[in-house]
Amino acid sequence: MIEAHGLTKDYGEKRAVDDLSFTVQPGIVTGFLGPNGSGKSTTMRLILGLDAPTSGSVLVNGKRYRQHPSPLHEVGALLEARSVHTGRSAYNHLLALAHTHGIPKRRVLELVDLVGLHEVARKRAGQFSLGMGQRLGIATALLGDPKTFLLDEPVNGLDPEGIHWIRNLLKALAGEGRTVFVSSHLMSEMALTADHLIVIGRGRLIADTSVDEFVRRASGTLVRVRSPQATKLRELLLGPDVTVASTEPQLLEVGGLTPEQIGEAAAAHGIVLHELTPLQASLEEAFMELTRGDVEYKAGDILAAAESEEAA
Amino acid sequence: MSSAAGPIAIPRYTGTGRVTQARVALSEWTKLHSLRSTRWSLLVATVLAIGLPMLFAAVTSSHWGHMGPRERADRKPLDIALAGVNVAQLAIAVLGVLVITGEYSTGMIRASFTAVPKRLPVLWAKLGVFAVVTFVLMLPSVVIAFFGSQAILGRHHILQISFSHPGVTRSVIGGAVYLMLIGIFALAIGAMIRNTAGGIATFAAIFFVIPPLLNILPASWNNAISPYLPDSAGRSIFSLTHGAHSLAPWPGFALFCGYAVVAIGIAAILLIRRDT
């Protein structure tokens, strides 16, 4: 579990993270989404105590990261910028970190095998490809078999097989009841992996919601209806808060009603339907929509919607 | 990476070991000996500390017949035996700086501080491990350099001095102590500056640039200031005799340790306060 309260970080004049509050729950994969430069990596560093917040605080498994007596057993971290000495072998890198917690060689060798670095474990890490570097990062994160994982852009530089492996790994970790917090600027990746999303733009919280909710809200739920009796159906459906647009004969795009409501209304009046399709924006489109233009206005929009829903 | 689709079996680890200073020291020892730059720097330092005195002893022996009485009087057996210390200190200092700046330049420091978020144990372990390694290598080096150079000079029956002669044992061991303290000092500077080039330049400025600059000052100023600089205070540890304008061995040693402690203190405060 990760709990951020009013987390704020200034670098000189620039505010990188602005009053972020969120909770990352165990048992699910939580995606941390935002365009490049939106403050994801800074937030990750604040969680790990590598940078100190200007104000606010963040707790990991109930404590500030620095207060944990055995941090590698609490949190496994994969940081975006490479965090490996280029002159040291993968094996010695892992071993040096393992020693700080008295983790034995056996565990290091086990993880080297798991991430598929067996053949290159004695090579200097500076010669590694980006993908191999990511695998080493994953092995580092798994060292202490921690309850919580913090992964900054883990699929960067991986081949399709590696990406598939990471997805399965994240789901397996969450399935075991662990907290998995994974950042990405790729919405499509999050759509496949994450259950819950925390979206930021310019250091501010834009959305904290399930993946399904996120797409639903951002896409504004239109329903495409095809019917030989389109004109009759249009008159039937029109009402306050309902919009009906038509781009070709027999085709309607209805806003403000669910497919169920439309289908039932049609059935009640004996209208034939040839198509009834909810139109959902892809996560990618939803994200573009949310972070485009005035990010703060959009943030207010979504949050207001969330609040009114909670109030209802 | 296993290509098998389906669920991944993550091997369990049930240990719950805490971070302790001893464990961090073992980690730092692993880091130190697993780098090529460490092995090269230490090899160079050892070769210089032993080799240069041998070379100077051989050259002095072969030229002894052509030297006038004044030149012969200028030759001191301990200067020859410890000639390598002056050069080895450069290799030790560069390595001392690199031990920490190498982590900043590669990003390794983030992994180190994620494993040990209290940070200071990392600094203590780096200082302790590097000091021990330097001393353990340099003590035999200077002792070998002393007896080796004495043996070469002894064949020509010149410039002989006994290891038990007053101050000789202290000077020879002092050479190794000086190199160890140089390593500590350089590591602390590296921790402050966090950049390899900047760290080495700062060290060089303190030890090689500022001391000769003081010669431009009026002699009375120079004589009042220069004994207290890190360079000359440190040197007094392995000097057999001291003049009117240099410190006695033990005060020099104490002052040099004082400089090292101040440098470590500043490094520690910055380490805790700064973002990584």
Image (spheres, helix red, strand yellow):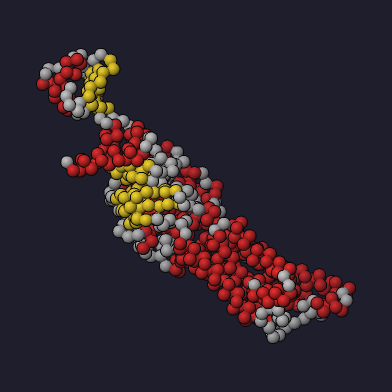
Instruction: Report the front residue among B99 and B42.
Output: B99
Residue A263, position as x, y percentages in the image: 16, 24
Classify the position of the N terminus of chain B by image quarter: top left
Q: Which residue is drawn at 41% across and 57% down?
A: A52
Q: Residue at x 58, y 62 (%)?
A: B97
Q: Residue at x 36, y 39 (%)?
A: A295
Residue B65, position as x, y percentages in the image: 88, 75
Q: Residue at x 79, y 79 (%)?
A: B159
Quarter where residue B96 is shown: bottom right
Residue B228, position as x, y percentages in the image: 64, 75
Instruction: Report the front residue among A88 and B89.
Output: B89
In the image: residue B218, left or right of residue A205: right
Name the outermost residue toward the left.
A268
Residue A142 vs B174, above or below: the answer is: above
The answer to whether any part of residue A113 appears in the image is no
Total numbered labels placed on residues in the image: 0
In the image: residue A272, left or right of residue B182: left
Residue A210, position as x, y percentages in the image: 27, 41
In the image: residue B49, left or right of residue A36: right
The answer to whether any part of residue A160 appears in the image is yes
Residue A275 vs B259, above or below: the answer is: above
Quarter where residue A234 is shown: top left
